[in-house]
Image (cartoon, grey):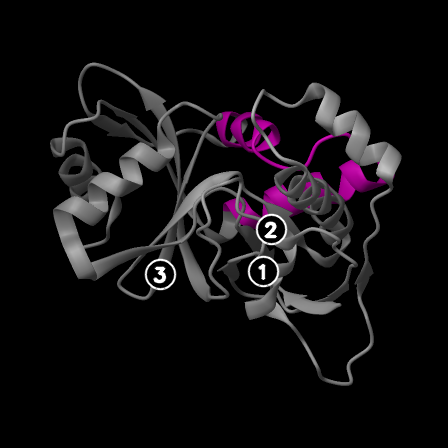
Amino acid sequence: MRVKIAGLITELCPKYENTIQLCKPFIYDGDRETDIRLSVSEEYLDSLMKRAVKGVNIGAIENFAYSCKFNVKAIRFQTMLVHSSALIYGGGAYLFSGDSGIGKSTHTRLWLKAFGERVHIMNDDKPVVRMYEDKAVAYGTPFDGGSSIALNEAYPLRAIVFVERGEHNSVRIPDNKEIIQRLYFQTAKKVKAETAVLMLENFEKLISFSDFFVLTCNTDITAAHTAFENIIPN
């Protein structure tokens, strides 16, 4: 199976229905050469299954495995995973990023409640950002993190918002050192030294193309309004 993810022709051979179905909207039947080839062994899947939380099925594990492989190989194409919920508003992408369980998906769902059809979620866990000469573009991927929200869409990246929990809602602008530290924990891991250098170069490009914010928020709908007022350009 060949799919097109972030403009990259990617070849993979999923065995389980979960990944097969998620890949269907991304299928590529053109004649471009393959950019990335992915494979996952049964041994690798078994090792992931042993470390997975109870109740996770092998299909979800395979999807996670392919996402890990893709996100490492995509780095050399100026493309990087930003572990986030990708919210689309006004023709642009706003990535709400943070550790699993921190509440990024809970927050973006508050936007759906607050702003209705003006917003939608492109991918709720594993969108990627690709840097071009003069811009950064956020893309959906067939890797869903279990949410089943994995649309084949692309939008100009407007901002990356790092989410943290708090009693009160507030927004601040981080400095570059904090941005790099936070990005490091929300992108591909376990890369070789050469790839790590490319990843840092991607960070620098991304900082030049995007706005960054830190959102401290609770789970009240007022959190969405606070974020909107401070993050969306007037």
Decide if residue 181 is on the left or right side of residue 121. Answer: right
Decide if residue 104 is on the left or right side of residue 231. Answer: right
Mark 2 to mark 3 CA distance (whole Å): 28 Å
Residue under the image location 45 percent in, 50 percent down: 210
Decide if residue 178 is on the left or right side of residue 19. Answer: left
- Residue occupied by mark 3: 92
Q: Is residue 185 magenta?
A: yes
Mark 1 to mark 3 CA distance (whole Å): 26 Å
Query: What's under tag 3, amino acid-wise?
Result: Gly
Residue under the image location 16 percent in, 43 percent down: 229
Residue 3: which quarter of the image? bottom right
Can residue 80 be seen here? The reply is yes
Locate residue 13, reporting x and y percent: 79, 58
Give the camera-side residue of 76 and 189. Answer: 189
Locate residue 118, reporting x and y percent: 20, 60
- Dominant SS of magenta comes to helix
Mark 2 to mark 1 CA distance (whole Å): 6 Å
Residue under the image location 65 percent in, 40 percent down: 64
Examine the rendered structure and indicate whether residue 201 appears above or below residue 50. Answer: below
Query: What's under tag 2, amino acid-wise?
Result: Asn
Q: Is residue 2 magenta?
A: no
Front label number (1 vs 3): 1
- Residue occupied by mark 1: 21
Q: Secondary structure at mark 1?
A: helix
Mark 2 vs 3, N-terminal side: 2
Q: Are marks 2 and 1 in contact (CB under 8 Å)?
A: yes
Give the camera-side residue of 209 and 98. Answer: 98
What range of the chain is rendered magenta? 178-207
Q: Secondary structure at mark 2?
A: helix
On residue 18, the disc is 2
